[in-house]
Image (spheres, helix red, strand yellow):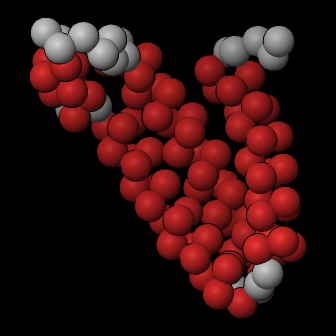
Amino acid sequence: MSFLQLLITSVIFNVTANILLKKAVISFGGISGTKANIIPELTRAATTPYLWIGLSLYGLSFLIWLRVLTFNDLSRSYPIFATLVFLLTTAGSIRFLNEDVS
């Protein structure tokens, strides 16, 4: 795969992972952070398919990103990656999570 194909694949996996992780948090009710609730909340989180798929996509995005960095300068790759992730995550949040941009 070319530099651009790898970069875009990593971006798409990263954006999709972010959206799925947000859907996971919505579906299991989130993490309050209180000591009394942490075990039940983590148990609910662990049974959410969105969480596992999102984490898997993050892992794949990371591995592809390492491949991108193997043959390309960070100063060239990261600005493209960060810009696309920012724009597409915002668009995906609006489209798939019905969020408002403020």
Q: Residue furthest front?
A: 35
In the image: residue 65, left or right of residue 26: right
Q: Is residue 51 above or below residue 13?
A: above
Q: Nearer the viewer, residue 35 or 78?
A: 35
Please name the residue shown 17% across and 14% down the image. Answer: 35
Q: Position of residue 25 (x, y in %)?
A: 41, 22
In the image: residue 54, left or right of residue 67: left
Please name the residue shown 60% across and 52% down the image. Answer: 14
Q: Position of residue 67 (x, y in %)?
A: 60, 82
Q: Is residue 13 above or below residue 46?
A: below
Q: Nearer the viewer, residue 81 or 27?
A: 81
- The quarter holding residue 74 reads bottom right
Q: Position of residue 30 (x, y in %)?
A: 37, 16
Q: Residue furthest bottom?
A: 71
Q: Is residue 5 above or below residue 32?
A: below
Please name the residue shown 44% across and 45% down the image. Answer: 54
Q: How many marks?
A: 0
Q: Is residue 45 above or below residue 72?
A: above
Q: Nearer the viewer, residue 68 or 94?
A: 68
The N terminus appears in which quarter of the rendering?
bottom right
The C terminus appears in which quarter of the rendering?
top right
In the image: residue 11, left or right of residue 54: right
Q: Position of residue 100 (x, y in %)?
A: 76, 12
